[in-house]
Image (spheres, rainbow, N blue to C red):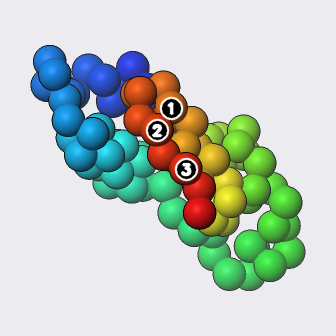
């Protein structure tokens, strides 16, 4: 995933370019979303694990945040969860 994002960045990207590229890749190109409420409330653990989020393209705040932070780290961004 990080390589796919890097391929779309300019030669010397600013941090904001990297953040915009991650957002575009995750939420617009690949359509990562919050799971339907009925599914989420029954199987919250599934939507928290990074591997499940990647496989299903659905996740709760924790799962998607882990994916986002992992990609940011691979792209050289120093983001911190708050």
Q: Residue at x 63, y 75 (%)?
A: 36
Q: Name the residue under label 2.
A: 78
x and y, in percent, of residue 65 in the image: 58, 54
The quadrant in which the C terminus is found is bottom right
Q: Mark 3 points at which residue?
A: 80
User: Disc count in the image?
Assistant: 3
Q: Do the residues labelled 2 and 3 touch (CB within 8 Å)?
A: yes
Q: Measuring 77% from the left and 48% from the top, which residue is drawn there?
A: 49
Residue 61 percent location from the top left of the image: 63, 65
| Image vertical order of residue 80 relative to residue 45, above or below | above
Q: In which quarter of the image is residue 3?
A: top left
What whole-number distance in Å separates the C-alpha atoms at marks 2 and 3? 7 Å
Q: Which residue is drawn at 68% across and 59% down?
A: 62
The reply to whether the C-beta atoms of the residues labelled 1 and 2 are less than 8 Å apart is no
Q: Name the residue under label 1.
A: 73
Please tell me whether residue 44 is drawn above or below residue 68 in the rendered image.
below
The picture quadrant where one finds residue 59 is: bottom right
Please report whichever mark, 3 or 1, sits nearer to the chain's N-terminal start: 1
Mark 2 packing: few (<14 Cα in 10 Å), some, or many (20+)?
few
Earlier-in-chain disc, 1 versus 2: 1
């Amino acid at each position: 995933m990080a390589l796919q994002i890097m391929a779309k960045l300019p030669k010397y990207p600013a941090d904001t370019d990297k953040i915009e590229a991650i957002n575009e890749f995750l939420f617009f190109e690949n359509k990562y979303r919050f799971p339907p409420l009925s599914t989420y409330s029954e199987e919250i653990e599934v939507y928290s694990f990074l591997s499940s989020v990647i496989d299903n393209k659905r996740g709760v705040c924790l799962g998607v945040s882990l994916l986002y932070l992992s990609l940011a780290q691979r792209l050289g961004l120093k983001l911190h969860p708050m």
